[in-house]
Amino acid sequence: MPLGKTMQTSSELGLTGEGWAATATVSRQADGRPGSYGWQVGHRQTDEFNTTAYGTYYSEIGRVSGRASATRAGTSADATVEGSLVAMQSGLFMGNTIYDSFAIVDVGIPNVEVKSENRVVGKTGESGKLLLTQLRAFQNNKISINPDNLPLNSTLSETDVIVAPRDMSGVTVNFGIKSESDSAVVILTDSAGVHLPPGTEVRLAGIEEPFIVGYDGEVFMTGLQSNNALTADLGGRQCQADVAFVPDETTQASIGPVKCM
């Protein structure tokens, strides 16, 4: 009988020529993902009794499980720790047991959610990397990342890749994320302090391609230096502005409002 979405219980009563036996258990299944856990408590009663308890916990660096049993003769208990240790050129990694193949996922940024076949398997550590176990050898495995936790000044070419590692071997998956430390959102207004209209083209000295103003006078610009000369095309006339910029690799810089005169 299910108890909610994760637990279940069962019971059994038997009678034979040798006597009777009653068994009852309550359990919760672990799904194998980091942070998941499972347990089971059971009791069997005959002329004797046997009570057992079992628990397991999956972390990002291994699985811990324990078992305890009590009978009329006494009690016993044991514990088990399982996992893997992988040494590659990109570093030393600990993870859950590898039964087939694995991958080192290199995002370059910590605390980014990683998925395998659209299933969350963990987050990158302080090094921006994650050991991904349980891949299928010689088959396509989809590995993806959740870009929601990426800094606003990060750029990446793709959020998912397909890999097919060999049996009992690993691959490195590099998502090539880079921080645009020369970028910023610049808020531009006219001489009266009114935001420049959306669609306005803004040119940065030394860069050929124009940048386009969005709502509220905001324009995302790259290639900025410490001092920058901007020119905006206002349809028949132009205005200029000088913008000072201080790079920041951790957050998306915002500058302004800046008057374009």
Image (spheres, rainbow, N blue to C red):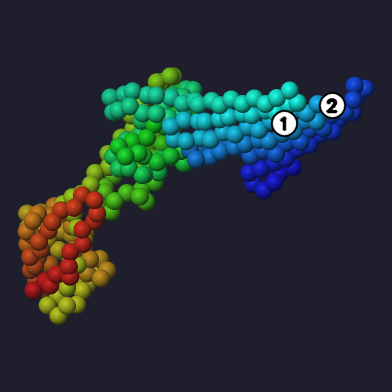
Q: Which residue is mark 2?
A: 47
Residue depicted at x 11% and y 71% = 260
Q: Quadrant of the C terminus?
A: bottom left
Mark 2, secondary structure of its residue: loop
Mark 1, secondary structure of its residue: strand
Mark 2 vs 1: CB contact within 8 A:
no
Q: Is residue 130 in sight in this rendering?
A: yes
Tell me residue 236's x, y (percent).
Answer: 11, 73
Tell me if 139 is positioned left or right of 256 in this view: right
Q: Which residue is mark 1?
A: 51
Residue depicted at x 6% and y 54% = 206
The answer to whether residue 180 is above or below residue 135 is below
Residue furthest toward the bottom? Answer: 192
| Residue type for callout 1 | Thr
Q: CA distance from mark 2 to mark 1?
A: 13 Å
Q: Is residue 116 in sight in this rendering?
A: no
